[in-house]
Amino acid sequence: MVQSARACLDDLERISSDQSSEARREALRRLTDLFIATSEMQSPSDSEEFGATIGKMAISADEDARIELSNRVAKRPNTPRNLAVTLGNDDTIAVAAPVLEHAVSLTAEDLADIARRHGQSHMLAICKRLNIDPRVTDVLVERGDDPVLEAVAENDGARFSDSGFSTITRRGAHNMNVNEALLKRADFPQHLRPEVGRNAATQFEAEMAESQAGPAVNAMMESTLGKSAPPPNAVRITFRKEIDLLHESGNLQEDTVIRFAKARCQGSTAYAIAKLADLDLPTVFTCVFTGSPVALAILSRALGFSSAAFWEIVELRKAAKPLPVNYMGEATSALEAVDS
């Protein structure tokens, strides 16, 4: 290390022993300035020494000073690993998050250890990294709650082991966002897709059953049964029986699909389309509710659906969850393309 820098470091370390919080904060700020100013001249051992000294000073610094430090060093390519580990293990998430999200000096082992030792906020911060090693995702999918599972499933830079994919499939079975994110991943194993598709379809049906108090659905039930709507847990079975009867008699047409879509019955709409197309429900679910509008346009035209039916299905998807950016424009282009 350059001699003047070494002398300055020693001087700042002595200042940091001052009992004044403001003095310690100023010493930490000046030492960080020195680290940044001399970073291109530092050897690996110099960097490690800076990291150890700054980390030692940070431990006794107040929260605001630690937050400031973390934000200053998190995105630097040469942030000492020992300093990043110290900050990443800070119990205050505002201190830990910047380095957990950005510090490239943190190894997979460091991140996995932090994920094991800390709570959901630390794991959620790790999920925001540009790239995540399978050794880290293994811990995240085993210990994470729903927001963590959603975040890691939606991160294209996250890589999973075979066991990691199996774990998130099992633990995220009840979560529509996790199921959708997994089905969209190019690296998601083919042998797990049917299971996730079934999970997603079941979740849609459950959401449908829980929301049957709407007037549109009650009207459908009265039209079908000639009486007041049954309890919610009977609705799905009743609608499926109607669809099965229509299909068996050759009378299942797009008007039934439109009727269910207008009533915002996702599960029954998908079930009717599956019957018409002679496809399994998970495949239809993926096409209609998680796939691109191109797939939906091709399926709609293959079944002879009108443009009105296509757009009603799009509205159904929109009602279930906000559409991806540019989806409506892509849907218009897709429909025009299949009609040309």
Image (cartoon, helix red, strand yellow):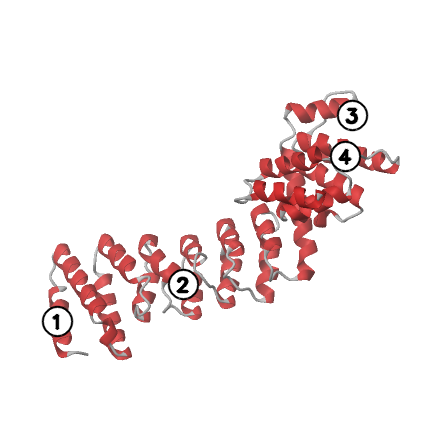
**How many residues crowd mark 3 within 10 Å: few (<14), some (14–19), many (20+)?**
some
Q: Earlier in the sequence, mark 3 or mark 1?
A: 1
**How many residues crowd mark 1 within 10 Å: few (<14), some (14–19), many (20+)?**
some
Q: Residue at x 26, y 74 (%)?
A: 47
- The x and y percentages for residue 162 are 60, 66
Q: Earlier in the sequence, mark 4 or mark 3?
A: 3
The residue indicated by pointer 4 is: 254
* Amino acid at pointer 4: Glu
Residue 236 in which image quadrant = top right
CA–CA distance in space, label 3 to label 1: 84 Å
Mark 4 falls on what kind of element?
helix
The residue indicated by pointer 1 is: 8
Image quadrant in which the N terminus is located: bottom left
Q: Residue at x 63, y 45 (%)?
A: 293
Q: Earlier in the sequence, mark 1 or mark 4?
A: 1
Q: Earlier in the sequence, mark 3 or mark 2?
A: 2
Q: Nearer the observer, disc 4 or disc 3? A: 4
- The x and y percentages for residue 164 are 57, 63
Mark 2 falls on what kind of element?
helix
